Amino acid sequence: MKGSSTLLLVALSLLCSCGLASDEDSSEFFMDFLQTLLVGSPEELYEGPLGKYDVNADAKAALTELKSCIDGLQPMHKAELVKLLVQVLGSEDEA
């Protein structure tokens, strides 16, 4: 669990620090990326949030491994992450 959490934090930090888009766009990208990572497939990541980026083979391998770690979470823990994402998305809608 510790390793998968570290991988997730590293991936998310890279996405945020790379400045892929403006602040508003990056927030939307981040939430879409996270949602797809939690409940989608690796293919959906490449077709959706990462669709306009050239994702090299090593990055794809890392994302597949990260997705595997997330899918390996206990169902209760994954459900709590989804609930948290829904809560964050709901608070963004109110803003």
Image (cartoon, rainbow, N blue to C red):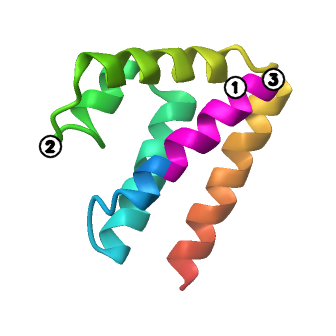
Where in the figure is residue 80, as x and y percent of width and height? 79, 41
Q: What type is the residue that disc 1 sits on?
A: Ser
Residue 73 vs residue 89, the one in the foreground: 73
Q: Are marks 2 and 3 in contact (CB under 8 Å)?
A: no
Give neighbour class at mark 3: few <14, some 14-19, many 20+ (Cα, 10 Å). few
**Residue 29: image location, x then y, percent:** 36, 56
Residue identifier under label 2: 52
Badge 2 or badge 1: first in the primary sequence: 1
Q: Which residues are magenta?
A: 1-13
Q: Position of residue 49 (x, y in %)?
A: 30, 43
Disc 2 versus disc 3: distance between alpha carbons?
A: 31 Å
Picture quarter with the C terminus: bottom right
Residue at 56 percent across and 82 percent down: it is: 94
Of the two numbered discs 2 and 3 on the same chain, state the one appearing first in sequence: 3
- As for residue 8 lying within the magenta part, the answer is yes
Q: Which residue is mark 3?
A: 1
- Position above or below: 93 against 28: below
Q: Are marks 1 and 3 in contact (CB under 8 Å)?
A: yes
- Residue 4 is labelled as 1
- Quote the CA–CA distance across marks 2 and 1: 26 Å
- Determine whether the residue tagged by mark 3 lies in a helix, strand or loop: loop
Q: Quadrant of the N terminus?
A: top right
Left or right: residue 4 compared with residue 40 = right
